[in-house]
Image: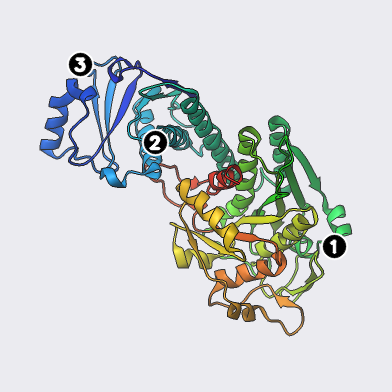
Amino acid sequence: MKTKLISQPLARAEADAVAVVLFEDETPPPELKPAATWLDDLRASGEFTGKPGELAVLHRPQGFAAKRLAAVGGGKKEDFDLAALRRAAASTARILKQKGVKTLAWSLAGGNLQGAAEAAVEGAILGEFEPDRYKTFTKESKALDAFQVIAPWEGSELASAVERGKILAEAQNFARDLANEPANRLTPMLLADRARAMASEAGLECEVLDQDRMRQLGMGALLGVAQGSAEPPALILVRYKPAETPKSGDHLALVGKGVTFDTGGVSIKPADGMEKMKYDMAGGAAVLGAMRALAELKPGIPVTALVPAVENMVGGKAQRPGDIVTSLDGKTIEVLNTDAEGRLILIDALTYAKRLGCTHLVDAATLTGAIVVALGNVNIGVFTNNEGLLGRVMAAAKTEGEKAWHMPLDEEYKDLLKSAFADLANIGGRWGGAVSAAWFLREFAGDTPWVHLDIAGTAWLDDAKPYMAKGPTGVCVRTFARLAMEW
């Protein structure tokens, strides 16, 4: 989708549709005076009251160059933040493209024009996404070709905001595309190929550790998960280096779980819903998407992405409950449940990140069903060993409208991981499952500042929303990008 910033009166904007946000109990702005009678009639009839999610369309509006005028409900003005704007632009794009609109113009208003421009572009591009790549008998494709941002003035700051929104949204859609790939079309090594191609196009460094190299290093936890599959594992590394070395010496690691398909292994999952386990690499997709964005946004600190990529399969060589593996840092682990595999691959990646000199660790993983029980599909579960890094991550998530909730990691939870036969077990029992999983990761983060994002409930939509298609959400891409840019 092409994006463009224009500065001209609303009535002169040439597009298939021009959209204006209207709030509850608010008098329409002067530029909508030619349509005042129509808007008054809508409010009088109750067809349009300005509530969130409402959309009314006037065809061939007199006094406007656009073919349609779209009134978009914004709700209460004091509640209309950038997240609400992003959703409004997305839902408007999704609805109007189905009505044959190819060019949509969005009128900006309010104080934070840069933030609004960025959010509107993000919303339109995210809303335009459809997970229908493999459909061969769809109806005629309906898509937006162009999205125009109408601003009261033009300038480099606003133009940069529009471009930034495009970069971030396209990176998020890149992550959604990856997470939506079926496992027969995205094995661990094919994911590595996609990462290489992205890095080459973006001007990033990419390195892939194969099974033999990981065995030499001693990544027994990761390799234990991979041994049941005919598809070999990979540890994908993508590096961004700023033009100038930062004086702080900080080096951010973004670590993403990359299980391209998860049967649960010998501790097999129920058949119902297993087809969605192609998205068990959504954390890995998010960090790769973030790196794609950072290559263009160019933060001032080095960032290394690590994606341990495996299949967790049932086979004659699959690891069994009761097996004991040795992790990269030397700790032994009793595998009580082979379906708690994400934490096993992440710990070797976290340990390797520290060996590479990374000073701050942030991981994203579809790690536990327990976090979905706790927080549903609304909030990311956030765990940490460092309040300073936690503050940075939470601030980035809030700015980007990705809801996150700080979860506890009290010392008492560590006892859940005790094992009579190894240094620790890979599960902690039924209660506090998301917390014990995070504690398992914390054991390997050690004293290095670390934040864990459990995205099991937020990385996939079972049903389409007005602002987003069913399927992968690409959650954390924008948060990761913001985190690096605000460092």
The amino acid at mark 3 is Gln
**Image-quadrant location for residue 173:** top right
Percent of width and height locating residue 52: 28, 43
The amino acid at mark 2 is Asn
Q: Which of marks 2 and 1 is nearer the N terminus?
A: 2
Q: How many marks?
A: 3
Residue lying furthest front: 247
Classed neighbour count for the residue bearing mark 1: other residues with Cα under 10 Å, few (<14), some (14–19), many (≥20): some
Q: Which of 386 and 62 is in front in this view?
A: 386
Q: Which residue is tagged 3?
A: 62
Disc 2, SS: loop
What residue lies at 15% left-to-right and 26% top-to-bottom? 36
Disc 3, SS: loop
Q: Which of marks 1 and 3 is nearer the N terminus?
A: 3
* Residue 45 image label: none
The amino acid at mark 1 is Gly
Disc 1, SS: loop
Classed neighbour count for the residue bearing mark 3: other residues with Cα under 10 Å, few (<14), some (14–19), many (≥20): some
Q: Alpha-carbon distance for marks 2 and 1?
A: 51 Å
What residue lies at 68% left-to-right and 81% top-to-bottom? 418
Q: Which residue is tagged 1?
A: 218
What residue lies at 35% left-to-right and 23% top-to-bottom? 152
Q: Which residue is tagged 2?
A: 112
